[in-house]
Image: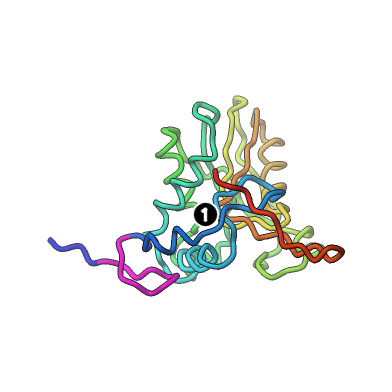
Amino acid sequence: MMVMSAVCPSCGQRVDRACEACWAAVRPAPVGAAVAAAIAYDGAGRRLLVGLKYANARQLVIPFADRVAALVPPGAIDVVTWAPTSGRRRRRRGYDQAELIARAVAARLDVPARALLRRTGPNVPQTGRSGAARADGPAFVARRLWRPVRVLVVDDVVTTGATLDAARAALERSGAGAVTCVAAAATPLRRDRATGQEPVFSRGL
């Protein structure tokens, strides 16, 4: 049976996951990002993640998961979960991109993936909102944990870290022993207004 190739959401070429040239153009996460992240959410990296998030480019789950899993020290995590999107957006897309990445990360770390968080805050997309607006939501409720497990929370994009902070707080209230947060991508810091300097990016994972 022939397996049809997919279209790279960055350059439009037909490839199995995303063309190597586009991945090579992806920048590492900016230094000073709110949490550890695999790549910068700009340029080719932004196009790839937007393809996964909005265009059903699920072939990108594996390469994103590989990069996120590389951020986690071996043996540091007992269970992986994710910061869930709203039910309305999940129904519209047919999937939650953070869940897809988290489950693939768990497989790479050889630990279980569990739906530990339920979103209860404002049903408003975080993308494009101001920092002050992001601080107002979302909120989460976590499943009760009966032993202090070490939890890894995965999100797709981090800007201020408000979403993952809320997820961390909910899990800590539920009895988690330690909570580590990671993201597939981090929004680059804005240009320094005083110096005009561009944001600094890390050199790799």
Give how far across and how far down residue 76 sits, in percent: 55, 28
Q: Quadrant of the C terminus?
A: top right
Name the residue located 74 percent from the left edge and 64 percent from the top edge.
190
- Looking at the image, residue 43 sits to the left or right of residue 9; the answer is right
Mark 1: which amino acid? Ala
Image position of 139 (left or right of 64): right
**Callout 1 environment at 10 Å: few (<14), some (14 to 19), or many (20+)?**
many
Q: Work out whether residue 47 or residue 130 is closer to the camera in this orientation and state it.
A: 47
Scheme of colours in the image: rainbow
SS for tag 1?
helix
Membership of 13 in magenta stretch: yes
In depth, the one of 157 and 96 nearer the eye is 157
The quadrant holding residue 77 is top right
Residue ranking furthest to the bottom: 12
Magenta stretch contains residue 64: no
**Residue positioned 65% across, 67% down in the render:** 127
Q: Which residues are magenta?
A: 5-16
For image coordinates 49% across by 58% down, the residue present is 97
Which of 37 and 175 lies nearest the eye of the viewer? 37
The N terminus, quarter of image: bottom left
Q: Residue furthest left?
A: 1
> Which SS type dominates the magenta stretch?
loop
- Above-or-below relation of 45 to 12: above
Q: Mark 1 sits on what residue?
A: 98
- Give the x, y percent position of residue 7: 34, 70
Q: Residue 75: give x, y in percent of width and height.
A: 50, 26
Q: Using residue 72 as the reference point, say whether residue 108 is left or right of it.
A: left
Q: Is residue 173 left or right of residue 110?
A: right
Q: Residue at x 66, y 39 (%)?
A: 171
Q: Position of residue 105 (x, y in %)?
A: 46, 43
